[in-house]
Amino acid sequence: MTNETKINDGRKAELLATQVEHIDIKSFDARPIIDAMKKMSFTSRDTGRAAELYNMMLADQDCAVALVVAGSTSAGGCMDLYAELVRNNMVDMIVATGATIVDMDFFEGLGHKHYQANEVPDDDTLRSLYIDRIYDTYIDEVALQNVDHTIFEIAESLAPKAYSSRAFIREMGKYLVQHGKKENSLVKLAYEHDVPIFCPAFTDSSAGFGLVKHQVDSMKAGKPYLTIDSIADFRELTDIKIKAGTTGLMMIGGGVPKNFIQDTVVCAEILGHEVDVHKYAVQITVADVRDGACSSSTLQEAASWGKVSTAMEQMVFAEATSVMPLIASDAYHRGHWRNREKRAFAKLFND
């Protein structure tokens, strides 16, 4: 080992010294704050109404709740928050980016950590140290490659056929039950509570690297290999919408997950089913509406496509780690989840 390597090892340890600590929504009661914010204006009042709508979803005995997550809030400290929503029957299905599920939650489920970037040198220096950066958060690239290889191992253990992302993520949850190092993993808890997770762009994550390696190695050996079937994702999620009837959306960010869950209404109609639009909808985003992108298109706009109701929807233009802990803590302490039916939608499918 050269002196330069020793210096770099020390520098890497220095930069990865402060772990991100995920917020515990049970440790504080946000109800008084939310109640006060409802009497204010601007983003505070929007946040108060969003919390009110989420509580309405949980109190509505006919309503199935979808948690929809895009962006890096899991890495930024909301990972345990989302896990608690599953643990306490506050969501019935999840639609998310591959990064949220694989690079962040499964990553920590294997025992790895995210770190606060208390100092940000130039990114070429970070690259030389194998440190990946998400704004002010660091990830050890060596640890992330462990995720790639673990996904490869899971793929190698499965029958070579087409899997929806939901079916493959369920296998990831099963793996964490046996080999995981974190109790509060969203992937693990979703497996244990039969809450299906969908990643419509699943290979846009560490899963992609592991699955490509699985396919390449299988092709070289002349063996069949598994694939991820995104059409099956859409079909399965639409099946859940048809089964659920009344639905509510709690959306953090936008992009593909947002459009994917909203489109189930249209898809069900194409299949000949009469289904209601999503009755409740909350979206938390900082995206600008002027570019017309899916991430920023308002819920009112979605109503024109026959996807959501305009009666009970709320846009919150805020960075989600600043408001989602308040909304989730408020809902936890109001306790409507205690009387909810456990839907266990994962049991609809035979894997």
Image (cartoon, rainbow, N blue to C red):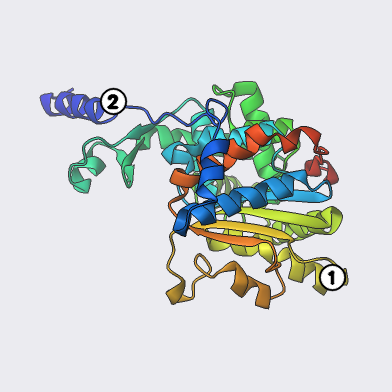
- Mark identifier at residue 204: none
Seen at 43% across and 51% down, the residue is 319
Q: Residue furthest front?
A: 39
Crowding around mark 2 (Cα neighbors within 10 Å: few <14, some 14 to 19, many 20+) is: few
Mark sitting earlier along the chain (1/2) = 2
Give left or right: position of 68 versus 118. Answer: right
Q: Is residue 325 above or below residue 282?
A: above
Give left or right: position of 140 versus 302. Answer: left
Seen at 14% across and 26% down, the residue is 7
Name the image quarter holding the C terminus: top right
Residue 255 placement (x, y as % from top left): 53, 62
Q: Is residue 229 above or below residue 195?
A: below
Q: Is residue 240 visible?
A: yes
Circle 1: residue type = Leu
Camera-nearest residue between 292 and 145: 292
Camera-nearest residue between 25 and 111: 25
Q: Is residue 148 visible?
A: no
Estimate the spatial distance between the alpha carbons at disc 1 and disc 2, rounded to whole Å: 53 Å
Q: Which residue position holds label 1?
A: 271
Q: Which residue position holds label 2?
A: 17
Camera-nearest residue between 333 and 178: 333
